[in-house]
């Protein structure tokens, strides 16, 4: 077996002990005589898997009782539509646009109402988070929307926006479970799990109960109503059984590690190794204003696209994969999610240091 250090933005690297556990259980899950992927979602044994996954997530994130946890297919992208569909009362939605993902979400919401972009960092290619302390929130806004960690641009919020009493909705896909968050500050927290938790094709939606309404537009497809999922324990239809099972393993792994405080500590230490190097390097530099730097996605560049490409090729040859930056930022991007060991980041920095010395 030979595993590379995989810096992919998503689907992304998984904790090795979790993969090994899954491998051990693959053919016969706990004496059931079958694999989880062969199992009825209506069976007792699967019910226990999903119940435990939810209970462990609640413990990890300290989710209050007045919030539901929903496992929904369609990835994070489906939520771009489900949120305005289900939260629409006045048909006015306030969006803070800080990068590709919040922009996509805002564009999707336009299909269902009036979208106000109440702040944006588009003027500097989304390399910072705008001041969100006193925004022109619309009196009629049904919610205020943020992408709390922009995966492509590598920015993250230092403090949440002042929503002036409006509901806050946050896409946490690329920072999900990377640090403790106060769930009560939000109306909805959601994320596609393939960045920081498990396999693609599953979103976890943590939603305050009063936002799950039955008086939504009657034209909304049954599957796209939050009450459908809430009233059926996320099993109105066959859920993404496999992804939920794997996520459950990761939740247990994080609990055993010491929870999200511990994960946050590790993530800070890990990101510092890379950012300290970028700040001391003459060849490489980070593209984000320091105070808004993401601990999860680290974009950086050399002085030219040619040099960027040469470095990407050299890293790949040396066993570091998926470091090519997104085309809208260019350069390189190292995604250093929960499951990337600090040894991987240290090894990458050692490699880049040596590369810089040899190619100065
Ligand atoms: C990847 C990503 C998405 C899209 O996720 P899908 O599961 O592919 O729909 C949305 N938002 C953020 C912040 C992401 O990183």
Image (spheres, grey):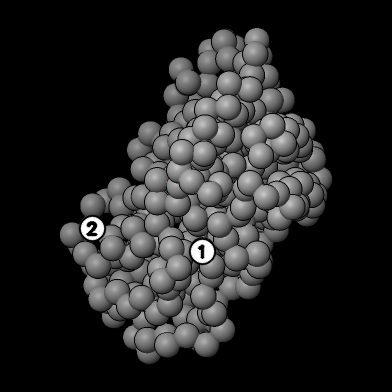
Point 53% across, 13% down: residue: 34
The x and y percentages for residue 131 are 54, 79
Find the residue positioned furthest to the front.
360
Query: Tag 2's secondary structure?
Result: loop
Mark 1–mark 2 Cα distance, whole angstroms, equals 36 Å
Q: Nearer the viewer, mark 1 or mark 2?
A: 1
Give neighbour class at mark 1: few <14, some 14-19, many 20+ (Cα, 10 Å).
many
Residue of label 2: 220
Point 40% across, 51% down: residue: 328
Image quarter (top left, top right, bottom left or bottom right) of the N terminus:
top right
Does residue 5 lie above or below 285 as drawn?
above
In the displayed structure, does residue 246 sit left or right of residue 326?
right
Q: Do the residues labelled 1 and 2 touch (CB within 8 Å)?
A: no
Residue of label 1: 127
Label 1 C-beta lies within 8 Å of the nearest ligand 1 atom:
no
Does residue 204 lie above or below 217 as drawn?
above
Does residue 163 lie above or below 289 as drawn?
below
Q: Nearer the viewer, residue 164 or 133?
A: 133
Point 38% across, 34% down: residue: 238
The x and y percentages for residue 216 are 28, 67
Answer yes or no: is residue 25 visible: no
Give neighbour class at mark 2: few <14, some 14-19, many 20+ (Cα, 10 Å).
few
């Amino acid at each position: 077996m030979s595993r590379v250090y995989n810096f992919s933005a998503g689907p992304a690297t998984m904790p090795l002990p979790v993969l090994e556990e899954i491998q051990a259980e693959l053919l016969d899950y706990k004496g059931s005589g079958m694999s989880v992927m062969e199992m009825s979602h209506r069976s007792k044994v699967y019910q226990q898997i999903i119940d435990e996954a939810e209970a462990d997530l609640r413990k990890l994130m300290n989710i209050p009782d007045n919030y539901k946890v929903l496992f929904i297919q369609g990835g994070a992208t489906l939520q771009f539509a489900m949120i305005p569909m289900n939260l629409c009362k006045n048909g006015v939605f306030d969006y803070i646009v800080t990068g590709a993902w919040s922009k996509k979400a805002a564009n999707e919401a336009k299909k269902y109402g009036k979208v106000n972009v109440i702040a944006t960092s588009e003027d500097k290619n989304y390399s910072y988070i705008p001041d969100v302390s006193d925004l022109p929130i619309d009196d009629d806004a049904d919610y205020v929307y943020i992408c709390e960690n922009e995966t492509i641009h590598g920015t993250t919020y230092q403090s949440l926006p002042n929503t002036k009493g409006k509901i806050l909705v946050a896409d946490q896909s690329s920072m999900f479970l990377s640090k403790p968050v106060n769930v009560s500050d939000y109306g909805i927290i959601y994320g596609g799990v393939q960045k920081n938790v498990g396999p693609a094709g599953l979103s976890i939606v943590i939603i305050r109960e009063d936002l799950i309404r039955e008086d939504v537009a009657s034209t909304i497809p049954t599957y796209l109503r939050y009450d459908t999922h809430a009233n059926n324990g996320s099993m109105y239809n066959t859920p993404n059984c496999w992804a939920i099972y794997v996520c459950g393993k990761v939740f247990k792994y994080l609990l055993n590690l010491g929870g999200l405080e511990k994960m946050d500590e590790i993530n800070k230490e890990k990101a510092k190794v890379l950012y300290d190097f970028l700040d001391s390097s003459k060849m490489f530099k980070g593209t984000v204003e320091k105070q808004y730097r993401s601990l999860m996605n680290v974009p950086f560049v050399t002085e030219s696209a040619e040099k960027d490409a040469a470095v990407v090729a050299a890293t790949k040859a040396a066993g570091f994969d998926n470091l090519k930056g997104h085309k809208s930022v260019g350069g390189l991007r190292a995604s250093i999610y929960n499951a990337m060991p600090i040894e991987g980041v240290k090894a990458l920095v050692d490699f880049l240091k040596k590369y810089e010395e040899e190619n100065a």
